[in-house]
Amino acid sequence: MNKKYSTLVEIEHDLKVLRLQRDIVKETLKLDLTTTKNHLNPKKLMDTTGFGLKQFAIDFALNKGLEWLSKLRHKR
């Protein structure tokens, strides 16, 4: 895209817009990096893993309990 400029003011305006866009992208990247670091925080990872393990243990216990009840019911 080759834009034809007729004044220096137009060039300065477009350069200012490009600088602002670049600054916005930089700040967005900084925010994304901070967010990623926070998500990879060891405590947060342990909390997430701990929740997953608890959920697994509950599911396992419920399944075993239901199997046991099913076997008990079929014995009668």
Image: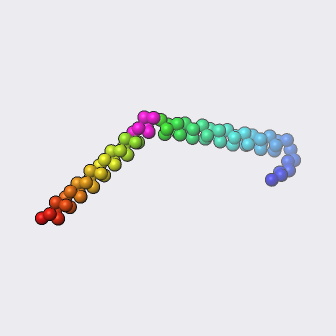
Whole-percent x, y for residue 43 in the image:
42, 34
Q: Position of residue 3 (x, y in %)?
A: 83, 51
Q: Is residue 45 magenta?
A: yes
Q: Residue at x 86, y 44 (%)?
A: 7
Query: Magenta part of the protein: which range?
Result: 42-47
Asked if residue 40 lies left or right of residue 15, the reply is left
The part of the image, by quadrant, that contains residue 46 is: top left
* 52 relative position to 63: left or right: right
Magenta stretch, main secondary structure class: helix
* Left or right placement of residue 33 versus residue 46 in this view: right
Name, please, the residue furthest toward the left. Answer: 76
- The part of the image, by quadrant, that contains residue 15 is top right
Residue 19 appears left or right of 52: right
Q: Residue at x 40, y 42 (%)?
A: 49
Q: Quadrant of the C terminus?
A: bottom left
**Image spot of residue 41 (x, y percent):** 47, 35
Please give the name of the residue rendered at 83% of the width and 52% of the height, measured from the top-left corner: 2
Of residue 51 and residue 32, the one placed in the foreground of this image is 51
In the rendering, at what x and y percent does residue 53 appear? 35, 44
Q: Residue at x 75, y 40 (%)?
A: 16
On screen, residue 11 above or below 70: above
User: Which residue is at the front of the view, 71 or 8?
Assistant: 71
